[in-house]
Image (spheres, rainbow, N blue to C red):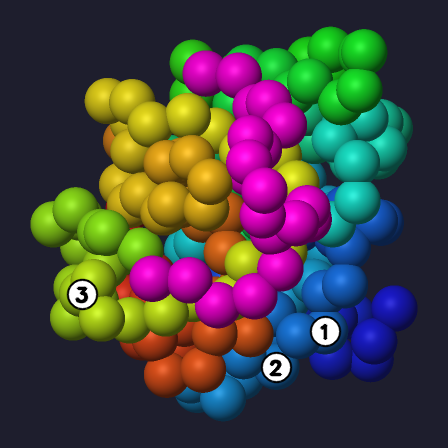
Amino acid sequence: MPEANKNPDKTSINTVIIDTGCANLSSVRFALQRLGDTPLITADPELIRQARRVILPGVGSARAAMQALSAKGLDTLIPTLTQPVLGVCLGMQLMCRQSSEGNATVPCLGIIDTEVTELCSGELPLPHMGWNAITPTSHPLFAGIGTQDYLYFVHSYCAPPGDFTLASCDYGQVFSAAIGRDNFMGVQFHPEKSAAAGALILKNFLEMSA
């Protein structure tokens, strides 16, 4: 565990990045540090509850990520959080009811009532990897972001458009580039790898409070 994460002062925890054990956490941490934040990487339930805001990152498979969360008791904790929570990439997908991987269905956190399925990209290659424009709603997470802004995606699964959609993207099919319900938000793209537009989205998140 990094030295900076030892014995934190609970009253000073602005942002927690949940340590899922199966994500590249450094890029998210560095992106927040560039914005002047001092994020704490932890899987400690009490520290997660104390934070002013929480980020749920993720890479890899939904099954492995849910197993890691369950082993740490975080699968039951996360849906109860009341501060702003941002899921990134797989972290967004974990907020959904379930995810279909191959022939398997993986129960997820159930925060947003939708299913993640394989992206139907047509003749376009999978995974969807690269820069794409999004169509954002007026949600505060996307303040200052327009259809001319491009974000960086790496994924093969997606959530469909619906009432929970905060932004959409078209890659062979239209899918949810961001979803949300109440204090929970998720983005399918990687804001920490999305240059100025991604930094603005993270800045908007850092300005949110419970």
Q: Which residue is mark 2?
A: 30
In percent of width and height, residue 179 lies at 36, 36
As drawn, the residue found furthest toward the front would be 123
3D distance between C-alphas at marks 1 and 3: 28 Å
73 in the magenta segment: no
Which is in the foreground here, disc 1 or disc 3?
3
**On screen, 12 above or below 113?**
below
Which circle marks residue 146 in the picture? 3
Which circle marks residue 26 in the picture? 1
Task: Between residue 85 and residue 153, name the one nearer to us.
Answer: 153
In percent of width and height, residue 112 lies at 42, 21
Given the image, on which type of amino acid does mark 1 rest? Ser
Highlighted range, magenta:
114-133
Q: Are marks 2 and 1 in contact (CB under 8 Å)?
A: yes
Q: Are marks 2 and 3 in contact (CB under 8 Å)?
A: no
The residue sitting at 63% across, 27% down in the picture is 118
**On screen, 34 above or below 47?**
below
In which quadrant is the N terminus drawn?
bottom right
Which circle marks residue 75 in the picture? none
